[in-house]
Image (tube, helix red, strand yellow):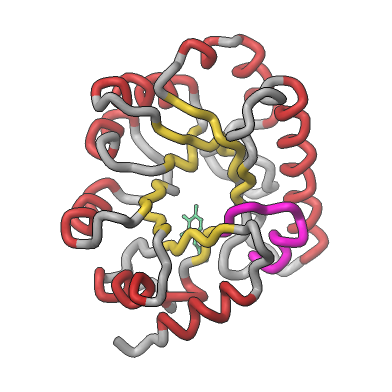
Amino acid sequence: MDVDVAGNLKKVLADLPEGVKLVAISKFHPKEYIEAAYSVGQRIFGESHEQEIKEKVEQLPKDIEWHFIGHLQTNKVKYIAPYISMIEAVDSMKLMKEINKQAAKNNRVIDILLELHIAEEETKYGFSLDACREMLKAGEWRDLHNVRICGVMMMASNVPDEAQIRKEMTSAWDFFNELKRDYFADAPWFKERSWGMSHDYKIAVQCHSTMVRVGTAIFGPRVY
Ligand SMILES: *Cc1c(COP(=O)(O)O)cnc(C)c1O
């Protein structure tokens, strides 16, 4: 292994204020890299492909909390439902219903985050703020007893302009507060704000993130 995973991990952790969780994004990295992070105490890892995560879950320690961070197709939910700790990028009612169904089959409640589309970049994924408002207003989610909505997740634009990144993260923070006030005031578990990646996690922790998703800064560049 030519990457100092343990050293990198410690550097990232040193940048995080208390109360901010680190999700180590291990997608496309071999299990030895995860073991290196695990051996210095890291327990939360994020993956974005159903087949890859399955293989890693089978081979690695059982006390790892796995987050699914990528776009999840509804037909793949059943594979990860037995063990996934959190599904971070939920961006449709259809997906939420399927997660609820598969969670019920496994006799559990699955924690999820609502993925917001705030960045100016074109992407197919994430609720627009208005679509998210409408979904919550419609109220169908209240019947999904095997899904627990724990907060919001977003990816800021991948740009060098720090002000732009700050603006987007601040919009996400404002929107989190709106949802907290309007729908989740009585839900203490609705508290997570997942933003910040390798290039912008230091900005994210200044912009009210509670969960940063850092891959490259810990494990080095991915080999696809
Ligand atoms: C890959 C990925 C990350 C990690 O990105 P790095 O730049 O390697 O830190 C974070 N969030 C999501 C949604 C990702 O897909």
Q: Quadrant of residue 86?
A: top left
- Vertical comparison of 84 with 91: above or below: below
User: Looking at this view, is 30 or 191 the one in front?
Assistant: 191
Q: Is residue 133 left or right of residue 106?
A: right
Residue at 56 percent of width and 38 percent of height: 115
Residue at 64 percent of width and 52 percent of height: 210
Residue at 64 percent of width and 65 percent of height: 201
Residue 144, image x, y percentages = 45, 16
- Vertical comparison of 45 with 32: above or below: above
Quarter holding the N terminus is bottom left
User: Looking at this view, is 185 or 152 the one in front?
Assistant: 185
Residue 143, image x, y percentages = 48, 11
Quarter holding the C terminus is bottom left
Q: Magenta segment: does it hold 202?
A: yes
Q: Magenta segment: does it hold 54?
A: no
Q: How many marks?
A: 0
User: Looking at this view, is 125 or 102 the one in front?
Assistant: 102
Q: Quadrant of residue 14?
A: bottom right
Q: Is residue 196 left or right of residue 185?
A: left
Residue at 55 percent of width and 43 percent of height: 123
Q: Which residues are magenta?
A: 201-212
